[in-house]
């Protein structure tokens, strides 16, 4: 089993960006939590601020990874390209959001990726990534 964990734009700024919403813990701390949750399986953590780079990464996962955990960040609400890339490779995918996108601004309530993801976890902080990894470990 091999999992790909993708984080979209500005998630490298965790700990600095809007701590009242995303918490005080840093992106490195998130990576350490993910590494711990992936103990015993193969995994890769990838972060990019660029939509096309995320599309390239998803395409390169074809026949390589068994599951994807993705927090597309702002691209959640805008990117048909990321949705289409996920549909193209057809790999089981869990969508994660640190904050609860359903209780924030109206523009955050719609997610393109939700149209493909087998599960969406929002508003559980960094623990959402651990839940997503556990879900894929149990179901893929
Ligand atoms: C986010 C929610 C998005 O609306 C926002 O653009 C982000 C992070 C979250 O993890 O809560 O950058 O995906």
Image: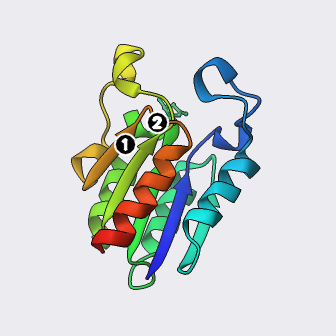
Q: Vertical placement of 91 versus 74: above or below?
A: below
Residue under the point 39% across and 71% down: 137
Measured along the vertical axis of the image, is residue 25 above or below residue 137? Answer: above
Q: Secondary structure at mark 2?
A: loop
State the separation of the CA atoms marked 1 and 2.
Answer: 7 Å
Please state if 21 lies on the left or on the right of 82 as rendered: right
Q: Residues within 10 Å of mark 2 (few under 14, many from 20)?
A: some
Whole-percent x, y for residue 125 in the image: 53, 36
Q: Is residue 113 visible?
A: no
Residue tagged 2: 124
Q: Residue at x 34, y 15 (%)?
A: 106
Q: Position of residue 115 (x, y in %)?
A: 22, 47
Q: Does the closest atom of ligand 1 sit within 8 Å of the Cβ of label 1?
A: no
Q: Farthest top residue?
A: 105
Which quadrant: the C terminus?
A: bottom left
Element under disc 1 = strand
Identify which residue, 97 or 108, lies in the foreground.
97
Query: Which quarter shows the N terminus?
Result: bottom left
In the rendered structure, find residue 121 and report the number of the disc placed on it. Answer: 1
Disc 1 to disc 2: CB gap under 8 Å: yes
């Amino acid at each position: 089993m091999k999992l790909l964990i993708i984080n979209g734009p500005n998630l490298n700024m965790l700990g600095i960006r809007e701590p009242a919403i995303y918490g005080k813990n840093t992106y490195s701390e998130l990576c350490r939590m993910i590494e711990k949750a992936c103990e015993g399986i193969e995994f890769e953590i990838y972060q990019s601020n660029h939509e096309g780079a995320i599309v390239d990464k998803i395409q390169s996962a074809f026949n390589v990874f068994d599951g994807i955990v993705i927090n597309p960040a702002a691209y959640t609400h805008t990117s048909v390209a990321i949705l289409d890339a996920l549909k193209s490779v057809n790999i089981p995918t869990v969508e994660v959001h640190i904050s609860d996108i359903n209780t924030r601004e109206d523009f955050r309530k719609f997610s393109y990726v939700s149209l493909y993801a087998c599960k969406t976890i929002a508003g559980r902080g960094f623990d959402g990534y651990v839940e997503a990894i556990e879900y894929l470990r149990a179901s893929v």
